[in-house]
């Protein structure tokens, strides 16, 4: 008959399991707090980048009495993304839109999980924390009224939920928003806007 005395079991003791449970109970709220703070920092960083861009657009308009875009429509506003000629004009690189070469904005380069500039081919793009370009609306008919982008797109996930609709018109000369963590501009629950 084999001797089992002195052999240790491969199963953890009850005391060890108790300590493991205690560590999980203590660390879980800390992990949730860490995730919340990371999400909050992402929102603040994105809002900061939108504010800097909005101020630069305002200064450009004050300096040149126009917006930093090549094609304008007198009867309707313009919607575009944060890249191309608009960004080149704000950075002072497009002499056709910004003849004096004034640098209206100094943007940081994007790093992993950070907003900023990235270069693709010969064009610069301004991206949010999730790597998506911002959406920009400009009041090119100068009536200080923009159609609220959130008003145009109903929720596709919860059409039966009755939520108050946002105002149809924004009293602003520019409006900027990010599609948020899900990178979908039609889901407004996580979109980050310059006007809210």
Image (spheres, grey):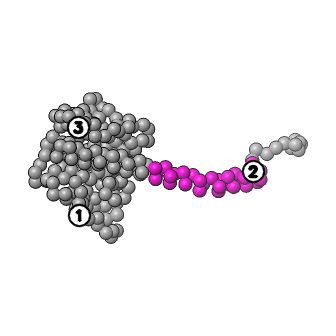
Q: How crowded is mark 3: few (under 14 residues within 10 Å), some or many (20 or more)?
A: many
Q: First in sequence, mark 1 or 3: give its number.
A: 3
In the picture, the disc for residue 189 is none
Residue 171 appears anywhere in the view = yes
Give the quarter of the figure containing the N terminus: top right
Marks 3/2 in contact by CB < 8 Å: the verdict is no
- 88 displayed left or right of 11: left
Does the magenta run of residues contain 74? no
Image coords of residue 55 (percent x, y) = 29, 48
Residue that mark 3 sits on: 89
Distance (Cα) linking label 3 and label 2: 63 Å
Residue that mark 1 sits on: 168
The residue positioned 43% from the left and 49% from the top of the image is: 42
Q: Is mark 1 on a helix, strand or loop?
A: loop
Looking at the image, is 134 positioned above or below residue 171? Answer: above
Residue that mark 2 sits on: 16
Magenta segment main secondary structure:
helix
Task: Tell me where residue 83 sits by quadrant.
Answer: top left
User: Which residue occupies the extreme top position in the image?
Assistant: 121
Q: Is mark 2 on a helix, strand or loop?
A: helix
Task: Tell me where residue 95 sits by quadrant.
Answer: top left
Image coords of residue 100 (percent x, y) = 20, 34
Q: Is mark 3 on a helix, strand or loop?
A: helix
What segment carries the magenta color? 12-41
- Of the residues tagged 1 and 3, which is closer to the observer? 3
The residue positioned 42% from the left and 51% from the top of the image is: 44
Q: How crowded is mark 2: few (under 14 residues within 10 Å), some or many (20 or more)?
A: few
- Of the residues tagged 2 and 1, which is closer to the observer? 1
Q: First in sequence, mark 2 or 1: give its number.
A: 2
């Amino acid at each position: 008959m084999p001797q089992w005395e002195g052999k240790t079991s491969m199963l953890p003791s009850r005391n060890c399991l108790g300590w493991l449970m205690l560590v999980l109970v203590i660390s879980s709220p800390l992990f949730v707090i860490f995730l919340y703070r990371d999400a909050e920092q992402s929102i603040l960083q994105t809002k900061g980048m939108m504010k800097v861009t909005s101020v630069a657009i305002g200064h450009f308009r004050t300096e040149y009495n126009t917006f930093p875009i090549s094609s304008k429509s007198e009867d309707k506003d313009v919607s575009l993304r944060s890249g191309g000629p608009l960004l080149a004009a704000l950075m002072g690189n497009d002499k056709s839109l910004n003849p004096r070469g004034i640098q209206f904005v100094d943007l940081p380069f994007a790093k992993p999980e950070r907003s900023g500039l990235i270069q693709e081919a010969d064009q610069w793009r301004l991206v949010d924390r999730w790597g998506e370009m911002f959406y920009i609306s400009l009041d090119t008919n100068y009536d200080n009224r923009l159609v609220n982008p959130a008003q145009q797109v109903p929720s596709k996930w919860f059409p039966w939920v009755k939520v108050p609709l946002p105002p149809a018109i924004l009293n602003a000369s520019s409006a900027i928003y990010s599609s948020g963590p899900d990178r979908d501009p039609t889901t407004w629950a996580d979109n980050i806007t310059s006007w809210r």
